[in-house]
Every structure is written in C-alpha cells, then in structure tokens.
Image: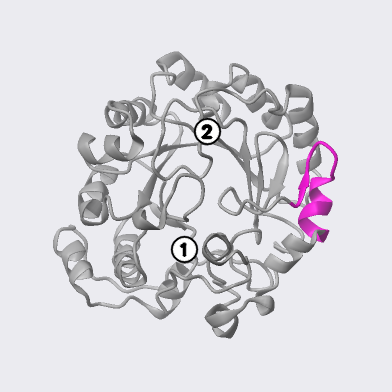
Amino acid sequence: MNFSENPIIVFYEVTRACLLTCKHCRASAQKKRNPLELNLDEIEKLAKDLSKFNNPKPMVIITGGDPLMREDIFQILDIFNKENFSLSISFSGTKLATPEKLDLISKKVKNVAISIDGSNEKIHDNFRNVNGTFKTSIEILNYLQGKVNLQVNTTVGKHNLMDLPNILRLVQSFNIKTWDLFFIVPTGRATSELSLNSDEIIQVMSWLYYVQSSMDFRIKVTEAPFYNRVKMEGPKDNGEIFNYLMKNSDIKMIKKMLPVTKDSKNLGVTDGRGTIFISHIGEIQPTGFLPIIAGNVRKDNIVDVYIKSPVFRDLKDPYLLKGKCGKCNFREICGGSRARAFAIYGDYLQEDPACPF
C-alpha cells in the first residue's frame, strides 16, 4: 500500500450529537443533531466515492458524537456494507445501546469499540461527566463477547495515569482484539492540563512496549506516533512512573521486535498520512483531531482531495516537517502528531511538543 494514494483508515463522523459531555471531546459534542448532517443519499454517494480508492479498500470507522443518536444508523451501516468495506463502529456507553441494537450492530460490523477511561466508576464517570457510563460500558462489552471483534479505547491523561495497571487488568478480563490508547490533543473540549508531559509519556510508552510483548491482543496508540520509535529502539527501563506501572502489572520484561504499520515507501501512519476524516457535515479533514478543512464531500471528489490537496500533500511529506521532527531520523516512520503541533503552534508542520525524544 502507498499512503500517498491510499488511506488505510477512513473515519466518518455521522453526527456530533451525544448524551455525554466528556472532558476530552474533540468534537465538543452536543445533545441535539445538526440539521446539516449528510443525509442517506449523500452518504450513499460518499460510500461509492470511497470505493474508488485503490485496493485494498480502507477500513471505514463510523464514529461521532454517538452514532446511535441517528435513527437511521443501521441504514448507514447497510450502505457501507453494500460497498464491501471492512466496517467498524465506536459509540457511547449510554442506554441507547439496547440489547436489540447491539444484536443488530454485531451483524453489520466487523469491530465495535467502547471507551473505558478508568478501572472504576469514579474515574471513568468523572471523565465522561455522566454517572452510570462505566457500568453501561462494561455491560455492553460483556453483552458483545463472542459476537463481534471488540476494541477498548482509553484516553490517557492525568486523570488515569496511575490507574493504567488496573485498566489493563480490566481490559484483560474481556476477549478483545485491540486496546487503543489515545494521547490527548488540546482541541475541542480537551485542554493541555489533562495531558501527560513528555517524561510521563515515554514512561507510559515503555510500559506499553512490555504490555504488547506480553499480551495476545494488539496495542494501538492514537496521536502518539513516536511509539513506533519505542517499538524499534526498545523501551527506556527507568523512571518512577515506569517502575510503578511495571510493579503493579502482571507482565514480564520481554523484549521483542514489535510490528510497525507502514506503507511501501516506509512511511508510518500519522494525521493525513494513511488517514482521512469526514465530518458530520461532509468536511474532509486529515483526522478529527486536526480541524483543517481540505474540501467537502458534497462538492469535492474525496479521492482527489486525499491525493492532490495541498494539506494532505504536505502531511505526507516528512521532509517538510519543522523543528526537531524535521531533523529526526524517525520522521518517516513517526513524524509526530500533526494535530498536536497545530493545536499548540497553529502550524501542522511544526514539531510535536509532546515528543519525549
């Protein structure tokens, strides 16, 4: 695969409506749907346009807000299934996720992602700003066991840094395929005060290296591509936080070569390089965390936008990067979070301020 021409993942935000008011929400989700959301005819055109990317087709992830806030969500899933996409969905831990809906979802998608941001109600519900979401999320994961591939999403920050070993134990109790850890980008409702500093990040990354080396499920990170460098160079086996995380986790210090997702030109995945995002009103962005609009699916060809637009062309060229990211020998496989660079400096080509190297 060539990331210059083909994304590996397409995120489609079907709505920004959500019953939760999470502290980190990049979409600043609201209770009511936007009347300008793409309708079914427009979504059908979007699916057909996405089919024009080269094979293998990208994975389509249906996200929000909360996709279950759309009454026509199952028709939307059918539209993408008709075009033979590998389909995933991420929705909120609310009472909208009834057993009847969960049964139907499990028949229409390959993967379901549910967020767990703490090992208990106090941490998780405080972060999500609605009581009961922890309990409901656990019930959803239990209900879907064996019915669909499961992914747990965890936003890593000051709120749960020392709770990570407990979250790991909870994650291990489910038969999941992937644990995706999101490193906060200060956009939407998220603030820098929630984020880990670079020293904390490298210690968490080093711990994750050993978690991935010890577990059967896949570890994925979002907005922290420097984890690729940790995979290749090995972990930093020191630091108070690292020692705490290792001491409180039932994992061994096994060192092995961990897989790195990259294309035929040795480019790793980062914002706009292997990824594309469509907002609820059709805006085409590199990711949901990088709110730069390169076009709109209502009037633009999404394949052309991904291949030819100046924003996407810039993001796919590691030799345009500035600061320490531009000088780094790992700029091709990593390249830093372009979303975080934009959020902090207003320049998506600047260095990633969270990079621990």
- Drawn side of residue 38 relative to residue 138, left or right: right
Viewer-closest of 284 and 90: 284
Tag 2, which secondary structure? Answer: loop
Please, what is the three-letter code of the amino acid marked with disc 1? Ala
Q: Is residue 102 above or below residue 301?
A: above
- Drawn side of residue 125 relative to residue 17, left or right: left
Residue 330 shows in the view = no
User: Crowdedness of circle 2 by 10 Å Cα count: few (<14), some, many (20+)?
Assistant: many
Tell me residue 41's x, y (percent).
Answer: 79, 24
Identify the residue under disc 1: 224
Return the mark for residue 175. Answer: none
Residue at 55% of width from left, 78% of height from top?
325
Q: Is residue 154 above or below residue 251?
A: above
Please, what is the three-letter code of the amino acid marked with disc 2? Gly
Return the mark for residue 65. Answer: 2
Figure quadrant of residue 161: bottom left
Q: Quadrant of the C terminus?
A: bottom left
Choose the circle earlier in sequence order: 2 or 1.
Answer: 2
* Magenta-drawn stretch contains 195: no
Q: Is residue 114 above or below residue 241?
A: above
* Magenta-drawn stretch contains 300: yes
Q: Which contiguous range is marked in magenta?
A: 294-308
Viewer-closest of 37 and 60: 37
